[in-house]
Image (cartoon, rainbow, N blue to C red):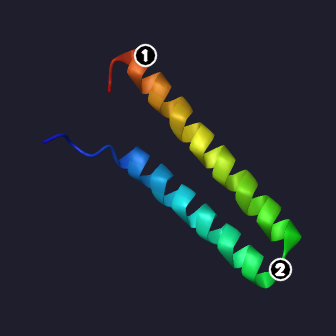
Amino acid sequence: MKKVKMIFLLYALATAISIMGIGVAIGERSIIGMIAAIAATFIITGIGFKTKAKMRAQGKL
């Protein structure tokens, strides 16, 4: 069984929370909240993929 990479778990949780934020913002009818949550989702996911590529290049993954 492979070891869990905690950094990727944290990125996944942060992305899931951002996606939940989109739902909350829709419920509150907050356009600024929706835009902020969508942007946060894209940014966190992008950082996660960038980290994964960096670790792969270093041979740590």
Answer with left or right where residue 41 lies relative to residue 17.
right
Identify the residue under disc 2: 29
Residue 2, placed above or below residue 37 = above
Mark 2 lies on a secondary structure that is loop
Q: Quadrant of residue 28?
A: bottom right
Residue 54 percent location from the top left of the image: 48, 23
Residue 41, placed above or below residue 55 = below
* Residue visible at 72% across and 62% down in the picture: 37
Residue farthest toward the right in the current orientation of the protein: 31
Give the tally of numbered discs. Answer: 2
Q: Quadrant of residue 22?
A: bottom right
Residue 41 percent location from the top left of the image: 65, 53
Q: Quadrant of residue 38?
A: bottom right
* Residue visible at 67% across and 45% down in the picture: 43
Q: Are marks 1 and 2 in contact (CB under 8 Å)?
A: no
Identify the residue under disc 1: 57
Answer with left or right where residue 55 lies relative to residue 20.
left
Residue 20 percent location from the top left of the image: 60, 70
Within 10 angstroms of label 2, few (less than 14), some, or many (20 or more) residues? Answer: few
